[in-house]
Image: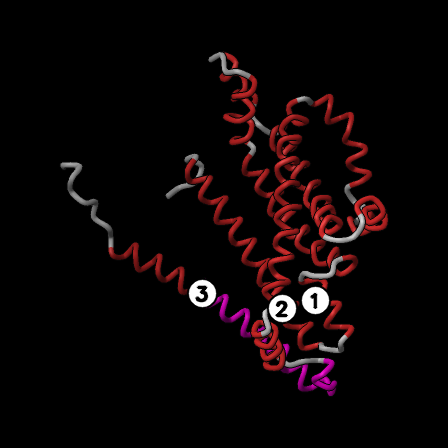
Amino acid sequence: MSDNFPVPVRPGLFRRLLGLRLVSLGYVVASFGILLAVWWTGALISGVSEALFPTPLGTFRALVEIIADGSLQEHILASMYRFAAGFLSAVLLAVILGLVFGWYGVLFRLVNPVVQLLRPVSPIAWMPFIVLIFGIGDIPAIVIIFIAGFFPVFLSSVAGVRNIPGIYLRVARNFGVGRVEIFWKILFPASFTQIAGGIRLALGTAWVFLVCGEMVGAQSGLGYLIIDARNNLRCDILAADIAVIGLIGLILNSALEYGEHLILRKWGLLGE
């Protein structure tokens, strides 16, 4: 058959794919529907004033209010700037160091005890020292995000390199592949799946601690908006802000999973 002829597509396959997407969408709608029903029921039967326990409708009205006055957009931009600066720098440095320390096992054995000592410490615990060193403003929140995101990516990168089959490296040496090329053409692609898992874990952790950091020392951002709403007894705005934080986290995680999917497909590690 000539290559110019179109490849026939089975109608049944398209219907199955469409059906799977509709089923997935149905689960999403059902999940959020259950959440709203439980929330609304709890607000109605609790006997607590709506000023203290807002209903979904009251929360939606508050969301419209802060969107209309432009404050929500400003806080989102401030938070996303800090998150991008802290998270991307943490991922970049952690991946590079993870590849190096995974390759040179002696170095990792040297630093691993210190890493295991510092890793369980909450980034918020460092806040007094961070404020003393960097002052107030954007930098403390960026540093908090960096600390929260660094360790999961670093350890997953090291583990990914150490789990690479030795045959890959022996073949590369036999073909005279240089050390730099081994790092970027063998170590990184071969350990990418494990690195990506660490990045997903770090994303959720860093997003949580972004909000915590902004609640402590910032004058803008989604975390600051929570404190400001609490101080002004606007629980409806507080609930709206929590919903926005969760939604942005969901979008970031979905975007990361999609990017990982594209990279794996480009490298031929994922089926069409």
Q: Which mark is residue 225?
A: 1
Quick one: quadrant of the N terminus? top left
Residue picked out by circle 2 = 71
Up-down relation of residue 239 to residue 76 (above or below): below
Give the class, few, some or many, for how many residues have Cα within 10 Å of label 3's Cα (few <14, many ≥20): few
Instruction: Judge left or right: residue 180 versus residue 146.
Output: left
Give me the C-alpha separation between circle 2 and circle 1.
9 Å
Q: Quick check: marks 3 and 1 in contact, CB under 8 Å? A: no
Amino acid carrying label 2: it is Ser
Task: Between residue 162 and residue 266, name the one nearer to us.
Answer: 266
Instruction: Judge left or right: residue 1 versus residue 215.
Output: left
Residue 122: x %, y % from top left: 79, 49
**First in sequence: mark 3 or mark 1?**
3
**First in sequence: mark 2 or mark 1?**
2
- What kind of element bears circle 1? helix
| Residue lying at 71% horizontally and 52% vertically, measured from the top left | 138
Q: Which mark is residue 92?
A: none
Quick one: quadrant of the C terminus? top left
Residue 79: x %, y % from top left: 64, 57
Residue picked out by circle 3 = 25
**First in sequence: mark 3 or mark 2?**
3
Amino acid carrying label 3: it is Leu
Q: Quick check: marks 3 and 2 in contact, CB under 8 Å? A: no
Up-down relation of residue 19 to residue 50 (above or below): above
Magenta highlight range:
24-52
Residue 131: x %, y % from top left: 82, 49
Task: Between residue 231 and residue 138, name the one nearer to us.
Answer: 138
Q: Is residue 45 magenta?
A: yes
Task: Between residue 130 and residue 209, name the one nearer to us.
Answer: 130
